[in-house]
Every structure is written in structure tokens, then in C-alpha cells.
Amino acid sequence: MDLLSIRGWKKEGEKQRTLNEIRDARSSDYKAYSKGEVPFRILSSLYIFSLVVICGVIAYEKTVVTYRAPFPSGEEKTNISVSIEVSIVVTDSSLDGMGEEVKKYLDNSFARRQQPLPVTIEGIVNDVKKRSFSSLLSDIYPPSPPSPPSSLDIFIALIPSKEWTHFSATSVLLTKGKWALVQIREGEDPSKILARIDTLIFDVLIGIPHLDLIVKRDARERIEPWVIATMTPEHQKRLTWDCNALSSSYSLRLVHVHSSFLSTINPILLPSLNRFASLLKDITTLNIKSEHLFDLYLGGLVEEDVQGRETITQQNVHLLLKEIDSLVSPTQSIDPQLKIVILHSDTKMIMLDGESDDVSGASISEWGGVIVNDDRVTENVLSSVRMILGMDSHLPPSFEREKVPISQWELTRLSIRSIVDSSLRTKHSIRALRSLIKDIDNLVFSDDLSNLISSSISSLSSSLSNPRMPSLNGLKKAVTNAESALMDASLLSLLYFPTEQKFGIFLPLIALYFAPALFLLPRIIHYCILRC
């Protein structure tokens, strides 16, 4: 053996072998081993390919694919129906004919009156009964305070002038209980009496105009300017309050602004508010908290008028609201916040309205109110809360309401409003969520949200099954679940991950794993053909 062959060099004249010659020169054992290894190579490639595909599909569905649970339906089939019984009592036999005439008139009024669709208000007028005025007094002035209503009934007493114990110019007295007293003057035109009772029942006790505004708000129906122009000034002022939605719960914060450490707090203020809140617990929940501010300087907001009084004008009230918002920290609660600011000062402070008239306080829609601390602070705070919640209604000149924080008939009227408002808001929230999911592909609708909507529809249907007294707690649950689902943050988890970005991320990964598989495919087909 020469040195060149040891080093692997070939002589210049030696012929170099081709690849086929080298392959043909292999032993038969090697060829058999290599041929038997082919299916295992194919299986291993298929295993890796399948593993990558399965894991990739799972990861894609978990992280990128927009999950859509089945959306429940059935809320549109639920009818909003309220049944109201009207009981009429006369205290003198001379009014028997008038009582029957009133009953006949109300039967026709309920049948022909245009109702705020899709709400159906059914009126059942009971037979006229006769009771003495003395026996009626125990019902008019019950020993127990008002309580949450157990029905939506209306009670009217027709009383002749000779038994009328109130101011003679008062035609209708709305008592603190459930009764409305109507004075029947001798020789009075019956058409005027019927018109007065019509206004009493439909405008005051039921609140048809208020319900009509709620329906228009839900339908996003625009109120024409000429309609507003035809309203009375009092009705125009009430328009903002009446259109506000009645939330199922509020966070009511009493903010006491002190000018010195010597100021005192009325001891009956908080107990009175708690008692007021307990009467509304079935309709709306008031979570009351008190706060105190000692570092707010009021000198820049107080002006001295020509009489030497310290006054706060309407313009300065807006500046005060900004100061309060900057100093009072927001709460973590999702409930709407209402702030009642009570100004404590060593000297008497007067608030002025836009016409420079003295007022007891200011109420701001969906914000709260500003009250000056004086001997009537409890009354003024309750009045402000009533106005913010939309409980006040403008009464005709001859109508009078007893001076109490809340009456039994007001609870009934507020219950009717809550039934209509909660039902419409529940349906609106469900429709809005269904429309969003239909129009936006990247919104995620999870099983939890599907269960919330299903529970809301079930609560809505069961709560409205009894028109005589729909379940207020069930309606609160229905609207809470529907609005919680509509505002849930999980809907937006993939909102900012559009389809173009998905392809931009996953196409390179797919090409990286699928390109070798495509090159391997001809060999797999060739092997399968040879095996067959």
C-alpha cells in the first residue's frame, strides 16, 4: 500500500465513482435495513406533524378564536301588563248617583285611553261602596307608618262639602295613606268633577305622562320642540327628572362641609334618611354614607347682596360642585352616586336660584343636591332626594298633598314606575347585547354571560306573571343581571385583536410547520403506492 492511498488521495488516473455506483455497491443487508426504516420515518414525521396541528388548533381556539355561547331568547314574548283595582267610597247617600257616574266614566276611560305601548295598564273599577266618614278616618290616618305596597290598588273617597274638614278651596286631598279624598261641592258641574277625578287617577296616582316619557326614552324617541313648548313650565322643569332611569340601587353620600369645628349635625337627619330608605327597599336600595370636609374654603363662593346677607348664587353652585368632585374620592361601587352637600356655616347662608329668589337648596340631575344647614335641613334633604329619584309630581292648583316624607299612594305610584322602567331596561339591555354580538365579530360571549341573560329572562317572565302585583325584587334581579352582562369586561377580551392581526401572527407559524410536510407528502404517496 502506498502513501497516497493511505492519505485517501487518489491517483490522477483513477476514475471517480458516481452516486449510483456507490449506492449499488452497498451491501444487501444495509439496503434491507434502510428500506425497513422508511415506514418508521414516515410515522415519526406524521406524529410530529399531527402533534403540532392538534396543539396549534387547541391554542388557537383558547387564545384567538372568539367563543360564542348560545344566546338565550324569549324576552320579547314577555308582556308588560299591570292590573290596577280602583275602589270608590261615598260617605253620604246623596252621592250615590255621582259614585255610579264616576264608576261608569272610569270604566270607559280605561278602555279608550291611549296607553304607552308596549305597556298595558288594565283598570278594574269595583262597585261603589258607602262608608261613614268617621269609620273612614281609621283608614285615612292609619296608626302604622307607610309600608311597601302589597298591591297596586287605588282608593278614592267622595266626600260632600258638609263633611269636608279641610280648606274649602282644596278639591282633592292626597293623604299620607292610600286614600285620595275628593270634595263634591253642592251644585257643581258633574263634568268638572269627572275631569278632576280623571286627572287624579291617570296623571297623579298612576302617572301616565311619566310612564309615557319612560317608554319614549327606551325607544330613543325624540320629543319634538313644539311638544315641549306646549307643556306647562312646571312640566318642562320636571322633564329632566322624569326621563331619568330608576336604578336598582344608589350610593347616597352625605357630604358635610364645615367652616369651623363648632358646627353641629342635626341628630334626626340620618335616622330619617334610613327610615326613608327602608320604605323604598323593594323598589330601589339607598346605601347611605356620611363624610365630612373641613378643608374647603367657601369664602370665594359666598357673595354679599344688597341686604348684607351671605348668599350663594346659581353660578357659584356649579363652582362648588367642581370643588366637591375634586375633594371627594370616588367609591369602588358600580352603583350610581348621589351626593347631598350640606353647608355648615357660623353665619346664616342663603341660596339663590337663577332668578335671584331665595331657595332652600339646589338639586342637580344625576349628581345630587346642595343644602344649607338650618332648622329644616332634614326636610330639605328628603325633598332633594325625592326630586332626584323622580318622586315629585306637579299637582293642579286645587290639589293638595299632606306634608309627609312619603305617602302610601306615592309608594304605589313609584312601584308602577319601577315595574315599567325595570322591564323596559331589561329588554333594552338584552336587545343591545344581542345586536353588539351580531355586528361585532370579536366580542366574546361566554357561558357565564349566557347564564346571566338566561337568568334575567327567567326573572323577567316570572316577575310579570302576576299583573295584580308583579315581583319588584324579581325585576330588580332581572335588570341587574341584564345590565351586568351588557357591561361585562370579558366581552372586550379580543376586541382589539382583529382578523388581519391573527393571520399576520399565525401564517408564518403555519408555514414553518406545513412546508416540510408538503415536501414529505410525495414520498408518502410513493411509499403507499409501492406497498399496494
Image (spheres, rainbow, N blue to C red):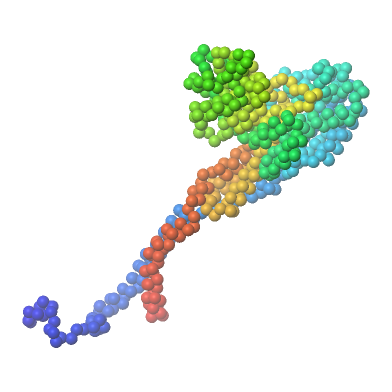
Q: Is residue 104 above or below residue 176?
A: below
Look at 70% across and 48% down and name the residue there: 77
Q: Is residue 479 above or below residue 345?
A: below
Looking at the picture, tell me which residue is in the foreground, 159 or 290: 290
Looking at the picture, tell me which residue is in the foreground, 200 or 467: 200
Looking at the picture, tell me which residue is in the foreground, 494 or 41: 494
Occupied quadrant, residue 504: bottom left
Rendered location of residue 184, percent (x, y): 87, 23
Q: Is residue 12 left or right of residue 265?
A: left
Looking at the picture, tell me which residue is in the foreground, 69 or 261: 261
Q: Is residue 111 left or right of residue 152?
A: right
- Asked if residue 286 can be seen in this view, the reply is no
Q: Is residue 441 left or right of residue 465?
A: left
Rendered location of residue 48, percent (x, y): 37, 64
Look at 28% across and 76% down and name the residue there: 33
Q: Quadrant of the N terminus?
A: bottom left
Rendered location of residue 50, percent (x, y): 41, 64
Look at 73% across and 22% down and name the residue there: 176
Q: Quadrant of the C terminus?
A: bottom left
Rendered location of residue 441, percent (x, y): 54, 54
Occupied quadrant, residue 307: top right
